[in-house]
Image: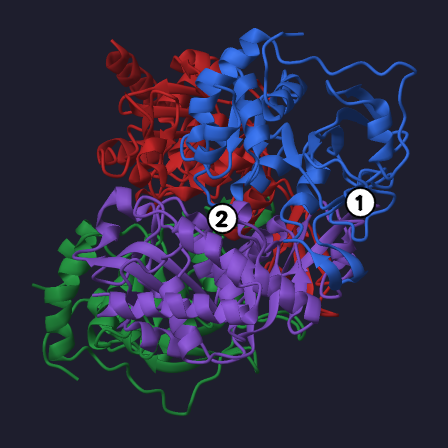
Chain colours: A red, B purple, C green, D blue
Amino acid sequence: MQPAAAFASLEELVRQIPDGASITVPVDGAGVALAATLALIRRGARGLNLITAPNSGLQADLLIGAGCVAAIETAGVTFGEYGGAPRFVDAVRRGTITVKDTTCPAVFAQLQAAEKGQPFTTLRGILGTDLLANRPDWAVIDNPFLPGDKVVALPAMRADIALFHAPMADAEGNVWIGRRRELLTMAHAAKTTLVTVEEVRDGSFLDDEQLAAGTIPAMYLGAVAEAKRGATPLGLAGRYGVDDGFLRDYVELARSEAGFARMLDRLMGAARAAAE
Amino acid sequence: MQPAAAFASLEELVRQIPDGASITVPVDGAGVALAATLALIRRGARGLNLITAPNSGLQADLLIGAGCVAAIETAGVTFGEYGGAPRFVDAVRRGTITVKDTTCPAVFAQLQAAEKGQPFTTLRGILGTDLLANRPDWAVIDNPFLPGDKVVALPAMRADIALFHAPMADAEGNVWIGRRRELLTMAHAAKTTLVTVEEVRDGSFLDDEQLAAGTIPAMYLGAVAEAKRGATPLGLAGRYGVDDGFLRDYVELARSEAGFARMLDRLMGAARAAAE
Amino acid sequence: MSDIAYTTKELLISVIAPLLAGCRHVACGASSPIPGSAALLTRMRSHGQMRVTVLGSQKNNFFTNGNGELFDVAGTGRLDTFFLGGGQIDGQANINLVGAGGTYPRNDVRWPGSFGSAYLYFVVPKVILFREEHTRRVFVPKVDFISAPGVSEPGIYRPGGPRHLVTNLALFDFDPARVRFVLKSVHPGHSVEEVLDNTGFDFDRPDVVPETPAPDAATLAALRGTIRREIAETYPRFAETAFAA
Amino acid sequence: MSDIAYTTKELLISVIAPLLAGCRHVACGASSPIPGSAALLTRMRSHGQMRVTVLGSQKNNFFTNGNGELFDVAGTGRLDTFFLGGGQIDGQANINLVGAGGTYPRNDVRWPGSFGSAYLYFVVPKVILFREEHTRRVFVPKVDFISAPGVSEPGIYRPGGPRHLVTNLALFDFDPARVRFVLKSVHPGHSVEEVLDNTGFDFDRPDVVPETPAPDAATLAALRGTIRREIAETYPRFAETAFAA
């Protein structure tokens, strides 16, 4: 038998995220580990280097509002049609977090470089932007095969931890993500990966050709925790939708720190109720 | 409705491969379009630039033996346990084809660069090999983030055509490949992709989350042709195995040109019989 | 011209749709119901020749390689048209999705971020700038932060860039050679003066600026039938309110 | 030592297995039934701590990202041990999988090609060279073509490289600091002289070279039971012939 991934409780899972860790998280709706995010806030995480792959909304805003984040690297933080991200905007304006603005394909390319163990990657575009002007950790190099052709070089993005939520794990700890392949890339790219799932099923997804095509093998995973409705109040495709009412209230109320605290309480209360 | 891929006969499909085209093909057993290869030989293709992704066996040997190939870029051509590739070995020794030796991860990295539309990629390793010494189309550059650290730069591998065989297509021309993700990368990387399939099913694989995870969308495909047992005498995972007897005979007999002609006749006869 | 009453959103869809004619593949980003509707309308008229990707849709999103596939599709020339907006847009078609006022990163106003603009603006042949609000707050002489530049120096790989700008007031083309917008038409009920008053940068215009044609009866019927149903999958509230009954 | 009769293949498996102790992940390439059996044996003894990838297997191959995943796993430090061979291997552990004699590319003898060796030899910490044939045809003073070099200059990224060499005659270690093989043991029934006669390069050896221990009864029982069943999935003919009954 091959070694299985370690199954853990939510609390055990977030204990594997030390203060100061760099963490990659997916787009709202693509499998955000929100229950784990609340557990991380409960344990009082500090100094996180949050990397959104490539953008975020509620998850980033909660972690920033709760004081867990020292720096964020992001192509965008927004609640989309609901409005702006209140704690993100406030923290950036007040300078209480470091923001590294980036662009979506840069994040994907850097994750792929890390996935391959390559030191850096290159990308078209970006030249002449103020993104590049503000990223001393990026470089401009020559295309070795076309003299005078400049490309932007980007370092591999190997986070300490990738954190996300998925529909299901099997008994060996393989995790099914379907066509959400960016989660696979995140898992390959990070040093280790922590996943929450809606349910744990018997058997092995790798024995089923259809499921195998959308599966992250256990070897990439540091821990798997069961968390029913673990993305709520965000949605999980094919399982449940987003909680419209909550997000509407949040973008309004979280403009103030007091309002944010009330909204966080509301989530924590719901999480406690769900756990009982 | 979205545009569907064009369904074609085997003959129509191979007519889309002009003489001199560069073609990427997969590993023996991973979905080799052998029936299409025979159709290509029947139409008398010449001057092909064959790129094995990353190695090959029977398919490359047949195309070389039939005089279709001007150059081959490969990490290896072999029949594995059955023995060496007789027509490949003979052509290389006689200098009747150009061989560009490469290494598997270089091919994958170059295909990914083409998939992303990036002009080149870099890879660890390779330094100090005679592969590098014989590849004027590769370069050695500095890692811009670590002075003195040399990496090998490789141009993107954008073939004219990717050609392979898969278990099934749907009515829209989406093709299911399961966990054979290298076929997806090949399709993304090539200018167009020609696929043969065991069967065409109703509906759309993209409407089924499990199937979608292993599907190549129609937009990447230039043509899809039904070819039952289209990989024979090679195998197709989950469908049928390899024809041991044929491969055993082939590696023996195809050492001579006359023997090769007999083995090719045997395949062509079987293909005619299957088509009737 | 049509005598049928129509909503502003129906007008904007009918303005954008003809700009997409002949495209093989049009994609619309998140929160883009008007571009999405225009793309679906043009697809309907294309007799199966045009592919539309609506991000956030299940039915009209064929990607199977993760979120990054959009950028790979764009980078390999498989995407003809994309839509971008901006908190600020200037006369050289530079766009700013990051922030205004103060000093970056501590801008007085902070927007979400640049998303894919810094790449797509370079590689997608026909980028359509779309911003409903047409004010001097948006259309500034010079953006405070360049998320993506309107044009690039010679020698920089740039097969793509801005080609059109659509607002609540008007339709512009962008001339990359002259690095200037050109006013093409002003929407019914608005005037060239109104456009001038609300635009913070110089632009070219013909002596007589045409009025934007109102959507015809066939277009409105298509919008209120097929397109409303198709866009509702991704934007249900938009589908309820954007179209006249 | 054991009094039980055993096959040469059983001996080679029992020679390789201890070299894998403590590894978290061992992978074996195509056409590698002996390394595969050794890996499965060591996994059995690891109490669930070791992962084995047998290329060509369905059961013992967890990759879900295509053929390239092996190289990504290796490049990110997730693969501890891999096996390589060579048509030629020289005393500096350079390996040649391409061809011999004549002038490249028109060598007199052409082998299949370098496969992943030019990368894996650099990044996998413990590469075990395995070649059953121990002759001067294989073990040459200098390879005719370097598919992958045994050592690299300082400054070249090289966390991996050759650590052991196993043949039908003997077990060697490779000392990368001295760039030389060291003879560790000679298999039962063979002699140091035989090794010297059949090796085309110089190597180090202790004054007294130990005999390779024969497989013990427990090892042979495991090989002929569990391991035979497990390796049969990928190598059915090998499973039928390699093990004594």
Residue drawn at the location 64% of the way across and 24% of the way down: D12
Indicate left or right for D166 with A249 as reference: right
Q: Amino acid at mark 1?
A: Asp
The chain under label 2 reads C
Q: Which mark is residue B78?
A: none
Q: Position of residue B11 (x, y in %)?
A: 33, 76
Assign the C terminus of chain C to one quadrant of the image: bottom left
Q: How many marks?
A: 2
Residue drawn at the location 41% of the way across and 35% of the way down: D58
Q: How much space separates mark 2 and mark 1, taking CA atoms? A: 34 Å
Q: Amino acid at mark 2?
A: Gly
Residue drawn at the location 31% of the way across and 57% of the way down: B175
Q: Can you tell which quarter of the image residue D76 is in? A: top right
Between A232 and D184, the one nearer to me in the picture? D184
Q: Is residue B18 above or below residue A250?
A: below
Of tags 2 and 1, the one toward the viewer is 1
Assign the N terminus of chain C to one quadrant of the image: bottom left
- For the question of whether residue A71 can be seen, the reply is no
Q: Which residue is mark 2?
A: C113
For mark 2, does the 10 Å Cα neighbourhood hold few (<14), some (14 to 19), or many (20 or more) residues? many
Q: Which residue is mark 1?
A: B149
Residue drawn at the location 33% of the way across and 60% of the way down: B230
Between C197 and B182, the one nearer to me in the picture? B182
Indicate left or right for A253 with B249 as reference: left
Q: Is residue B87 above or below residue A261?
A: below
